[in-house]
Image: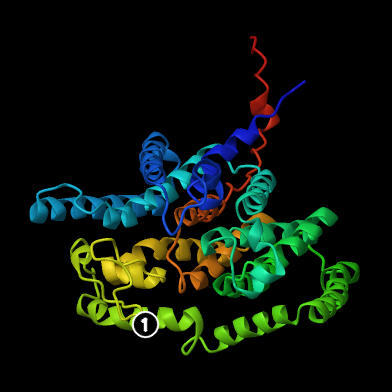
Amino acid sequence: MKISLRFLLLLPMLAVLATNAAFWEFVYGPQVDQEPDAIKLYTYMLFAASMGCIVLYWRHIAPIMRLWILITLACIGGLMLESYGNWGLVMVYPHVFSKLLVLLILFGIYTFYRRFGMPPLRQLFNVLTIVLLADLLVFHRDSLSASAFVENERGYGAAAAYLFVPITLFNLNSYLVKGRISSLLFFFFCLPLIIFLQHRSVWIATAVAIPINVLLLRRVPGVRFSLPKLVMLIVLPAILGSIGVTAVVLDNPEIVQRLQDSIEDISNADKQGTGSWRLKQIESYMPLVQERPVAGWRLEGFEVPMQFYDPSSDQPMWADRTGHHFHNFYLDRAFYFGILGIMLVLVVPIISVVRRLLQRAPLVPETAAFIAYFFCLLVYSASYDWATYHFGMLGLMLASLPLRAPEPEPEYVPAMEVPQSIAEPLAPVTF
């Protein structure tokens, strides 16, 4: 009997996902607005392991990725020189350095899976689903009630809730391509759960991801949007959902009111809700960003006094020299590293995705889901900075993309027929 060991390919990606609270809460328990110091040390170990992977499997890295890695290492080296020249320490503020070092995780995941092949993604997302649900039931079950929903008590942080987005996309594709009813059930389980967790930024990201994913499925061979599939995907859930909503309204009208309030927060983001809070943070830091738009404040930015004040108490939102805790990926990179910092992270993935979409080769369902996930991540980035695992997921996406067009196979040229008079040896001539 032959035993498959492909499940071992899950370990690097699971190691990166373990930096999310949904995983480490099983070891350290739920924490309030901070992660344990051991997780920070663990993240630095991942940086070192990723660097080792890059060195060992350098020859498996595509040219554009090699250039990206070398530029990133040059930026890290330049930041170290700046740190040593101005503060006498090689790495004076690890908070700022980590914003560049975290790219090593992206490169490490990409390199590993380019060398050994993609992991079994169905198993990966099954494990991820089990962990997320177990964490919710063990540590946050109080949030699974109508009263918690009305009072906006969220079981997860946004980064953990966002993990349900790729799970939703992969289950949707599995149903549309292979017709698995179990995948359809998981899809309709995850979608309401995303709504119930009440992270409006995740709602918007999901609303962006699903149409893009369905559009990309047109490039996947074997996908047919047949009438039975559409009935199962749209009509049946609409009927059951209407019945469920009616029951909820009759029993708990506060839930509907809470949903309406959340939708109003989204439509009036500049005036109310957390959208208004984020807008005020952007306005507070925009003068500093405009002062150094190209390369940002870098290490000096860590010493800049807190610019954002709590609207309710008129006190600094966070203490000085603890980082500025931006709830916006673009603002975070623009403040610390300017426009170049944003380009350092996004240019190569965007080029790679566009190049893949311009190729005539068909997509596989997993690649379609990854690309949709990447596009919705660009939307999510307007509300939150990236978590560590986002870089791992991006590396996994890049590993699934051919970063350059395949070389054409050499044209077959039939061998020239040799004349019979030459092919056969001449008979000896006798006189």
What kind of colouring is applied to the model shown?
rainbow
Q: Position of residue 359 (x, y in %)?
A: 58, 63
Q: Quadrant of residue 288?
A: bottom left
213 lies above or below 3: below
Residue 121 in picture, x, y percent from top left: 65, 47
Residue 151: horizontal and vertical position, in percent? 61, 74
**Between 160 and 372, which is closer to the camera in this rendering?**
160
**Residue 361 appears in the rendering:** no
- Three-letter code for the amino acid on which mark 1 is drawn: Pro
Element on which disc 1 rests: loop
Image position, residue 349 (x, y; %): 46, 61
Tell me: 43 left or right of 159: left
Q: Please indicate whether residue 309 sits to the left or right of residue 26 in the image.
A: left
**How many C-alpha atoms fall within 10 Å of the one at disc 1: few (<14), some, or many (≥20)?**
few
Residue hosting label 1: 311
Residue drawn 29% across the image and 74% down it: 316
Tell me the quadrant of the picture where the C terminus can be found.
top right
From this view, report whether residue 393 is shown above or below residue 249.
above
**Placement of 88 over or under 323, stated as above or below:** above
Side of 49 relative to 97 (left or right) = right
Q: Which of 54 and 315 is in front in this view?
A: 315
Tally the numbered discs. 1
The residue most toward the top is 431
The quadrant the N terminus occupies is top right
Q: Is residue 332 visible?
A: yes
The image shows residue 407, relative to residue 271, as above or below, that is: above
Query: Which sits in the foreground, 63 or 293?
Result: 293
Residue extending furthest right?
A: 228
Residue at image point 45% right, 84% down = 276
